[in-house]
Amino acid sequence: MANILKISKNAEEGLRELLRFLLEKKRVKAVFTLRKINENSAVSYSLITDSEMLKDALPLFPLMPQNAGKLLSRLTLKEHLLEPTAAVVRPCELRAFIELVKRKQGSLDNFIFISTTCPGTYPLELSTNGDIWKKLPEYEMCVKEGDIVPDIRPVCQACEHFIPYSADMTIALIGKKDVDKSCEIFLNTEKAEKLIEGMDGELSEGELETKEIKKLHSKRQEKKKELFKEINVESLGLSGLIETFGRCIGCHGCGRVCPICYCVLCDFDSRDYECEPSTYESELKKRGGMRVPPNTVLYQLGRLTHVSVSCVGCGMCTDVCPADIPISTIFLKVGEEVQNLFNYIPGKSVEEAIPLTKYEKEEFAEVED
Amino acid sequence: MEEKIGVYICECGPNIAENVDIDKVINVVSSLPSVGIVERHKLLCSEDGKKFLKQSIQEHGLTRLVIAACSPKQHEATFMKVCEEAGLNPHLFQLVNIREQCAWIIEDKERATDRATRYVRAALRRIPYHQPLEKREIDCNPDVLVIGGGITGIETSLLLAGPDRKVYLVEKTSFLGGKLREFEKLAPGMESTDKLLKHKIKNVEESENIKVFTNAEVKGVIGFLGNFIAVVKTGENEELEIKVGSVVVATGFDLFDPTKIPRYGYSKFDDVYTSLEFEKMNLNGKILLKNGQPPKSIAIIHCVGREERGYCSAVCCSYSLKFARYLKARFPDVKVSNLYTELSVPGKVYQKFYEETKAMGVDFIRAREIEIKEKVIKYLTEDEKEQNLAVDMVILTPAIQPSSDASKLAEMLKISQDEKGFFAEEHEKLGPVSTSMEGIFIAGCAQGPRNIADSIIQAEAVAGKILSSIIPGKKLEPEARTSEISEALCIGCQTCLEVCAYGAIYFDEIKRVSVVNEILCRGCGNCAASCPSGAASLKHFTATQIHQEVVEALR
Amino acid sequence: MKNGDALVIGAGIAGIEASLLLAGAGRKVYLIEKTSYIGGNVIKYEHVFPNLECATCMVAPKQQELLGNENIVLLTLSEVLDVKGSSGNFVVKVSKKARYVDLITCIGCSACFESCPVSVKNEFEEGLSERKAIYIPCNGALPNVPAIDTKNCLRFTKGENCQTCKDACMFDAVDYNQKDEELELKVGAILVATGFSQYDPGNTPQYGYGKFSDVYTALELERMFASNGPTGGKIKLKNGEHPKSVAILHCVGRKEKGYCSTVCCMYSLKFVHYLKEKLPEVKIYEFYSDLCAPGKSYQKFYEEMKEKGVDIIRARELKVAEEGKGMVIKSILNGKEDSLPVDMVILAPAIEPREDAPKLAKVLAIPRDEHGFFREEPYAPVATPREGVFIAGCAQDPKDIQDSVAQSEAAVGRILATLRSWKG
Amino acid sequence: MKGARVAVKDSIEKTVLNILSKAIDKKLFDVILIPIMVPAGDSYAWVLAQDKSLLDSASSLPPIMSVQGAKALSSVTRMGKTNKKIAALMRPCEIRAVIELSKLSQIELDNIFLISMDCPGVLPLKDWLKDPTKGINSFRKVIQRFVDGDPEPDQSVRPVCTICHRFYDSSAVDLHIGILGKKGEYIFFIPHTTQAETIFAELGLSFKDDISHWQNGVDEVLKQRKKKRSLVQEELKPEVIGLDKLLDTFSNCINCHICQSVCPICYCRQCYFDSDKVKQPPDDYLMRAESKGNISLPPDKILFHLGRMSHMALSCVGCGACEDACPMSIKVAQIFSLIADRSQELFNYIPGESLEEPLPLRVFEEDELHEVETP
């Protein structure tokens, strides 16, 4: 049983209300959320300090221009926040941030995390051609029904971690028939309860995990299986990977937008991977030909090994890939395998150490011969 | 260790105190993080001001220091010295200019105070990022390599050589003395050259501190001020490695080739000679026409190639006068005509020399569009009249130009050439014999056309620069605020090499990265500014330091 | 044991350069300067040929370095009275006039001379402006510490008890009790770098200097153009208007002196840049006899200036005459009489030895040539017949800044080479 | 200027590849750097082909530019000159980028033989990926239309390709293959270096034929293109003049920096805007937010583009790789080439036109850029 604050406004308006309250009551110094930043109705994450500016905030807008985890890390990389700041983020973004914090790429101090039961986000191209605005009604319908929203990112359709693990407040969306009339804010922490003291709206108690949620969960599991089948990821051997990644243009964009790829300079961009004359001369001797720039697949495999244990399956990589490679699907699969191996859910809790940083006597028995 | 920043605000008498509410500044600043102490003083640069500063640095155990006073041009050095005396690394100090950039230019006291506060805040925001840069010392070899055994090279060597300083003199021909050996006399004194040259050469050859290499050539020079390694190919074709602290380039000049201007008829007609050819004829005592007869009428043509080269060669006018004297001395009634454009006789002696020569019955004709035909010269007078002048011998005075191997040498020594191809001095006014490469000097006609006296001056000047900067046993203290290039980030585009004026950056061909030679670097920051990826950065002026300062100033 | 220290006479660019080098070599240097400031003539020039660099900005760093150098003892308002001994062991008697302002406590805030009641012509500004009895010659002069001119100060002339300057000073740096001193210095070598004077065009009436109000000397124009000068850089006629046509006459006094002063052609051409920068429309005429542009870079400068728009006229027998209300330049042009009306005339007077050269020559027992410049030894251009005494800059022969600097470096070369083995 | 007129057999592509494989037989080149179709058949990759059988799946004018050729070549020679004799067949804009990179020491041209070919443009990667087989056919039409001399470019190619005014040879290339002027019946081999003449003489090409047909063909297209270019750019201007407009235009940018990583001229190992130097403590961002009430994150979106612009505009060859790869479909290439044209004009510098011409920002002239001085 958790405490709930109910505001009789539609979910987004209610959330805006909450944010305005927090700012005006000086409970927080700033609010981090999505915002419509101009007439082209471009939507971007923003740091808002003036409650006036909240009128353009779109905290629930189904778009992920960047993984917020990456931005929050950028924000707190050098120092932790000195004053409370509320951040409205999706579960996978919150998990990504926590993974980064574990790697000392940011700090949770003074953050108040507001998240939602996440219906998923649309691919970026829908926002560039403006279609996203037309799709909003359909989106809201599916949310009420607790269905998988059509046309959202493939990995969103297959996402099982759509309930935030460590948010201070959670806006209940999925399966809520009245999201257009009321906004249910689950107060998961004392911090949360303190913050909303004095805010109008009725307090009640309730469960976040409704049957709709459970339904959606299994729907998504099904969807995932289909997704993996599509590119029959299971049977992708090395040759399969070479085939799939064959059209990679080596822009490393996937790494640049990946919240887990936090390196200042990616090893594959470093001098160590420069191609010495000797390298391709021997290659030519062996094979009579060589693809340049080299390391196309190697890069993907390398990233896979570095990232998979912490991959939160946000889908940014696929979304930006100029060559339309289903990267996130592959990473989701491999990630799942690796994470199960350590029964580790990336970003679930900040206390849980990253598997590769701790050593246990009894591990990998299965891989020993 | 706990940081403790000291902030000192100088009243500079009324200069700052009257226009800035210092107490207000102190109020704001005191509350800022890790500020240990904030104080004001009547005049920090005064003797007791400095004493006070030194004491408080030590008493309060300050780890960093911010002083708000006058322009760094004025007193940065002063206060850095105080830091050193107080045992605080002088680079952990920041001087804030609230006089020239604040008190003196902002009428309204309130605004001035606000500005001053901003500046101090900015400094406080910057100073935590300061690094304690350390002074370094490097050994310095006093020995000298002199390239070129003409009068300039000789003079330089003689002045420099001593028990505590070896000189290596490299001459490409088989003898010392250069072109001067072929001059019988010298203008304007008409003393015999031997008197000047012979004993100097003797002294060089006898000095145990000068090693002369004739028929020799410098193959390569690497290194930097105080630590050059030169490879010299000797007459015996062996390659010697010589360690020196400085290099002097005194490679002299070549003559402009008159065949480039057909109208002068050089090599077309008999009895048309260049000045050097004539000097030789005169030295050998036979000034004769091809037909064996002595000349009766001679024309000396000035400014041959001046237009083509684009400068006045400075010496032609005066040696033409000398030639006239040679001729008058040998053939009293020979007719000598000087065809000139502008008579250049600068300085206190040459005008007289000219007038006396003229008085000997030498003609001076201002002429343009000179054309030499068989035994006759066509030209235009000042008032555009065509004239013919019958002569049986013509002496051309070709322009002085850089010696043919100048560019090769410039490349080897990494020193620049000016647009005319002469070696470029460090500063046209204040650095006449220095180059952009510390420790490499230029003298004589290698730097530009000049007469013997001026060449000697430059030779002595080089000696002056070397003797005063490279002292046996004394170490060099290179600049501490140098730039550095991140090996990880540098991608080897070598833009920095192009913009470095001090030859302080070299390219590591194996790692394919640019590397800063911290001894040569003067910390101008050109490389940092031009590096697109920020691989190059300037210590004490890093992007972060500047950013922090600016952001706070704008806050 | 011989003495490695050096005495440098004259704190112009040559003297400064030499002092810095000698000090760098670890020698103690006594720098004697007659006036109250350092920098000599160079600091009067806003721009210098051929790069049109700002001269004050160019020298300032060297001046600062000099003032901060512990090996250099700067003695301003000082003159050499007597020199005894020989190379390596000179004993020099120097008279040092009191400045009456403390060099250390004064911060050069200028409060003192603002309040001074006395006003006299400022010789540094060629008399184009006035200064007080306590003064610095111009803004930016170094050391930035005023001096009291006892020839005009009421206190020292009339014995009045005026102390406005003392009262105005917050640091009580003004000290009337300072006394003139006589110092005895022991040095191993002496360098004479006393510079030059400008030939007085009054001696050649045909140029109308002093007769016509708008005939100026080169130095007067330099100051007029200088941003820290009497007009703040404005070039104006006496009637306050801008000149529409300007004639620049070269070789003023060349015939009389009997030599070419080497630098006039170049700086006269530089004036084209001065005038065109301030008055783009102005007509400029350069009257010259022979172009003297020796060396690798001056011809180019000549051509650059020519492009800025100037008539360069070779003429003889120049005269500045009155015609109607205005001036005309009369001359012989290609054998014909010619006359050209202008409303400003700038003269390029010869460079000549300083008035006090004879006296100094006597004190130092070194010879002068027929023109009165100190005489160098043949092909030892910085050496004098007296061993241990050297000469550099325009005191030896008219020359430009580059050659002066080179020569002072040369003198240092000689000094350090001769004093090499002696203790510094 | 003369050239060799070669009759087209089967297709221009086959004709060219045929000659190249001969060149390998004759050991005139050790290796050919050329785009080759990947196994999946859905893209082309740059391959150093030593074994000539590889040429079977090669393409002299592939429908797409998956990787800008200059990037491929620099990955081969950045660490030093090659000992193999490599012939690189590229599009004109790729060649130009190669020349720029060699000035920036990112490409060592020793032993490299540059061949370019008149270019009709390339298809946008995204369009192509929808159906590669269809793409191949539609690009055939693009080429045909081009060689037929239709000055109106096919609209299916990259937007910048439709206004490209440098689709023909740069003087810095060794050999150029002109396909314009003869409706694809003939193509022209035009040597720019004696090396080119000697090498291809070995293959029986004699450079005596008149090439005016080709030249006219180029001029025809060029006239139209120039008009169109200025037209399109004029239309674009309002979108970029003034900071506000610029901010709007780039407001969709998600800061992925893919434009920079695919740009051949952006050669930095690490972009300044990815470096630690741009990362500030939180109160920096808060402070900036407070001044306007809010700040959109990351804060240096526009700064990045302006910075990149100032770094590469003078060398920008307008290949369009950036725009093609932009996940937010921002008109990066169109905007950059608009700016590039102006700044290159300023120094009258044409990137990739000659090896001798130094990079403007590396040469200092005493009197330059008076037009931008403030009086």
Image (spheres, coloured by chain):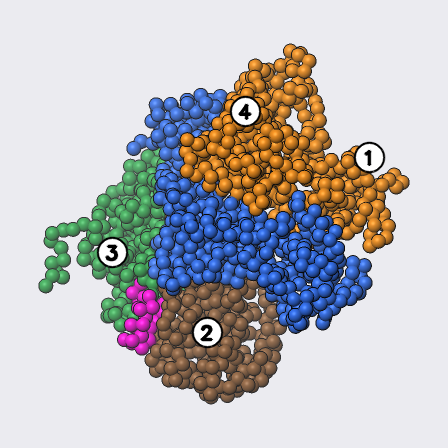
Spatial CA span between label 3 and label 1 = 97 Å
Q: Which residues are magenta?
A: A276-299
Q: Is residue C279 left or right of residue B54?
A: right
* Image quadrant in which you'd find residue B329: bottom right
Q: Secondary structure at mark 4?
A: strand
Q: Is residue B516 visible?
A: no
Read off the chain for label 2.
D
Spatial CA span between label 1 and label 2 = 77 Å
Instruction: Give the residue type at disc 4.
Output: Lys
The residue at which mark 2 appears reads as: D114
Against B181, residue C183 (above or below) is above
Q: Residue at x 67, y 39 (%)?
A: C370
Q: Nearer the viewer, mark 3 or mark 1?
A: 1
Q: Residue at x 44, y 78 (%)?
A: D60
The residue at which mark 3 appears reads as: A309
Read off the chain for label 1.
C
Against C96, residue A183 (above or below) is below
Which badge, 1 or 4, is on the more N-terminal residue? 4
Q: Tell me, for residue C93, which label it has, or none.
A: 4
Q: Tell me, for residue D82, which label it has, or none.
A: none
